Image: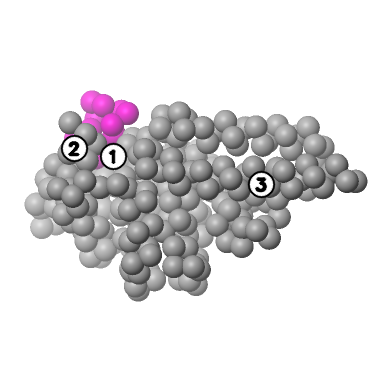
Amino acid sequence: MSIWDRLGDFIARVSSSASSGVADVVEAVRTVFSGDPDLRRRVAFSVAMIALSAKMAKADGIVTQDEVRAFQEIFEVPPNETRNVARLYDIAKQDVAGFEIYAQRMAQLCGSGHANCMMLEDILDGLFHIAKADGLIHEHEGQFLHRIAEIFRIDEAHYEAILSRHVNLGAADPYVVLGIERGKPFEEVRKRYRKLISDNHPDRLIARGLPQEFIKIATTRVAAINAAYEMIERGLRHV
């Protein structure tokens, strides 16, 4: 049984309750998939992305076709499961609970409990990918994403590194992209670069619970990291 079969069955079960909301969704993920930690991570990531993208759409007020396509780039949902995914999206969008409560519950469900958790960074990266799909990140989306980062305990420097991969990428400070202080010895820059490349290896991403489709999105992240490193290397070579 694929993750989408399991997720579809789970969504159908949760949405059958008239009182379904964020608390019901999170608790259901914990209990339904308690016997399979690997599957629970993948389902938790998918649920977090679907629910928080719905809340982001509500914060922004509109959902463009570009954003729908960007969502589909992250999740290649089988045609027979689109109805269930739409059902979970609607639960999140209509829930009276604010997005901050959603983010807190999803952080508890998906996160490691430590600052700058990589799984939560992956979720934030996916939300950025959707937000920028129509060519710019609107003010309300920017406020939403920054607040999500705060709730996820992603520190400001780390957030700036994530932001720089998505906004004005060509002109971004390469040191910000790598998340390292300007002026550090080149050996430290190279060490940081190698860690980022290792952390974003497809095997590592899959082990964290990301769906296969997200690996395609992660290539953009790796391209930005490579470009930043090469820019720093070229600059130092000419000093």
Residue 217 magenta: no
Label 3 residue SS: helix
Disc marking residue 43: 1
Q: For the residue carrying disc 2, how many other residues have a C-alpha within 10 Å: few (<14), some (14-19), or many (20+)?
A: some
Left or right, 146 with reference to 208: right
Magenta stretch bounds: 29-40
Where residue 72 sits: x, y (%)?
A: 33, 53
Residue 21, visible in the rendered structure: no
Q: Which of 31 and 137 lies nearest the eye of the viewer?
A: 137
Disc marking residue 116: none
Residue lying furthest right = 239
Residue 34, visible in the rendered structure: yes
Give the number of the mark in front: 1 or 3: 3
Q: For the residue carrying disc 3, how many other residues have a C-alpha within 10 Å: few (<14), some (14-19), or many (20+)?
A: some
Residue under numbered circle 2:
6
Residue under numbered circle 3:
227
Left or right, 237 with reference to 216: right
**Amino acid type at image mark 3:** Ala
